[in-house]
């Protein structure tokens, strides 16, 4: 009985420490039913669950926004290039990059279009910390910038899948410039 209480306390403390607390103003926690992410330059926007913890003060490796319900259960937006890139070029380049990553398997790939913006999509599986990681990668050009939206899940698949579907259903963007 005492061991169960100790385990419960450790779990609650871990959840608080890693997912809820606001240390150094690096996370923004909201409880509204829905929030809107708008990219710099108002290039595009989409809606996501207000219960997601938003990480702020980022920028490493091109990430401009990360929000989710766990360390590897999240949506993120990354600026890939400050110029437009054609869907065909994205498809070829991403396929080659993913194929070269040891332990990453391309499950499916395809194209989509939202708000007049062509998109290239990849579903991939990999591992992190010895556990399976599922990612939906969506590439597109908006406002003459090439972007990636990633929907990543390790243990909260249904929550992330629903958030990703909502982001795509509410996606609006400035039309892309002609790509090279």
Image (tube, helix red, strand yellow):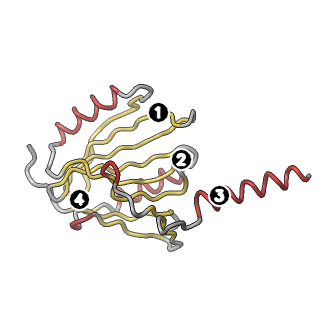
**Of marks 2 and 1, which one's residue comes earlier in the chain?**
1
Q: Quick one: label 3, few (<14), some, or many (20+) residues within 10 Å?
A: few
Q: Name the residue under label 3.
A: 15
Q: Name the residue under label 2.
A: 157
**Of marks 1 and 3, which one's residue comes earlier in the chain?**
3
**Of marks 1 and 4, which one's residue comes earlier in the chain?**
4
Image coordinates for residue 159, horizontal then vertical, percent:
53, 54
Which label lies toward us, 3 or 4? 3
Relative to 105, say whether 28 is above or below. Answer: below
Mark 3 to mark 2: distance in Å?
Answer: 18 Å
- Which residue corresponds to the image point at 42% horizontal and 49% vertical from the top-left? 151
Mark 2 to mark 4: distance in Å?
Answer: 26 Å
Q: Mark 4 points at which residue?
A: 115
Q: Name the residue under label 1.
A: 126
From the viewer's side, name the closer residue of 136 and 100. 100
Q: Residues at badges 1 and 3 in contact (C-beta under 8 Å)? A: no
Q: Quadrant of residue 131?
A: top right
Instruction: Label 3: state its secondary structure.
Output: helix
Which label lies toward us, 3 or 2? 3
- Which residue corresponds to the image point at 28% horizontal and 63% vertical from the top-left? 39
């Amino acid at each position: 009985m005492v061991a169960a209480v100790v385990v419960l306390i450790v779990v609650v403390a871990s959840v608080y420490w890693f997912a809820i607390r606001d240390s150094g103003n690096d996370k923004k926690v909201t409880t509204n039913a829905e929030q809107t992410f708008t990219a710099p330059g108002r290039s595009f926007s989409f809606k996501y669950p207000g219960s997601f913890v938003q990480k702020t003060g980022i920028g490493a490796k091109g990430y401009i926004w990360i929000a989710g319900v766990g360390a590897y259960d999240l949506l993120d937006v990354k600026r890939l290039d400050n110029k437009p890139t054609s869907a065909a070029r994205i498809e070829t380049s991403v396929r080659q990059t993913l194929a070269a990553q040891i332990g990453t398997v391309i499950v499916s790939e395809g194209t989509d279009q939202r708000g007049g913006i062509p998109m290239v999509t990849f579903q991939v599986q990999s591992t992190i910390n010895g556990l399976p990681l599922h990612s939906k990668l969506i590439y597109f050009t908006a406002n003459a910038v090439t972007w990636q939206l990633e929907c990543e899940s390790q243990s909260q698949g249904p929550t992330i899948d629903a958030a990703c579907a909502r982001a795509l259903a509410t996606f609006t963007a400035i039309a892309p410039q002609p790509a090279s």
